[in-house]
Image: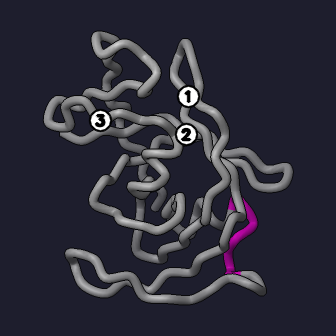
Amino acid sequence: MVVRVKVKISRNCRVLESTALANAGYEAETPQILIPTRVAQLLDLWPPREGMEETEFETAGGPLMVWIASRSCKVRVFADDVESSEVEADAVVSTLADEILLSDKMISELEIALEDVGRGLWRFRWEPKEKTRRSEPPRYWR
């Protein structure tokens, strides 16, 4: 099992709700949200815009070409009874991804505590340790 959370991604006047995989193994220096091209299209980030940086990420599966739009969107996590503060993020667009991923820095900025990844349990850091939440089902963007 893994931890997926519900997110709202906003850019200009566009807002998209989906689930995102909290991937602590996705190391980044800034809060980043990796999005498939379908999501990037809906947020008006695809095809690549002027100012987006094309770069290569090293992944467990080998090199991955991505396009980074620095500080281009705002992200928040929401649940039935609460939501996080909004975090400004780099949108990282991947032509191979079919799921939204949150980087380690993004997980931290959103104040997500991964309690039991094997069971899909998490909470917000400000919540009592007994208050665990269940992982959301995946949303694939093919």
Mark 3, other Cα within 10 Å: few <14 / some 14–19 / many ≥20: many
Whether 115 is drawn above or below 63: the answer is above
Residue 134, image x and y in percent?
A: 31, 23
Residue 113, image x and y in percent?
A: 35, 33
Q: Is residue 78 magenta?
A: no
Q: CA distance from mark 2 to mark 3?
A: 16 Å
Pointer 3 or 1: first along the chain: 1
Q: Which mark is residue 114?
A: 3
The amino acid type found where label 3 is placed reads Leu
Q: Is residue 17 left or right of residue 109?
A: right
Most foreground residue, 105 or 62:
105
Pointer 2 or 3: first along the chain: 2
Q: Is residue 83 left or right of residue 134?
A: right
The amino acid type found where label 2 is placed reads Val
Q: Secondary structure at mark 2?
A: strand
Q: Which mark is residue 1?
A: none
Residue at image position (60%, 60%) is 39
Most foreground residue, 94 or 70:
70
**Prevailing secondary structure class for the magenta stretch in the rendered image:** loop
* Residue wearing tag 1: 78
| Magenta stretch bounds | 42-48
Residue 104, image x and y in percent?
A: 39, 55
The amino acid type found where label 1 is placed reads Phe
Residue at image position (55%, 12%) is 81
Q: CA distance from mark 3 to mark 1?
A: 15 Å
Dots 3, 1 in contact, CB < 8 A: no
Point out the image quarter for the N terminus: top left
* Residue wearing tag 2: 7
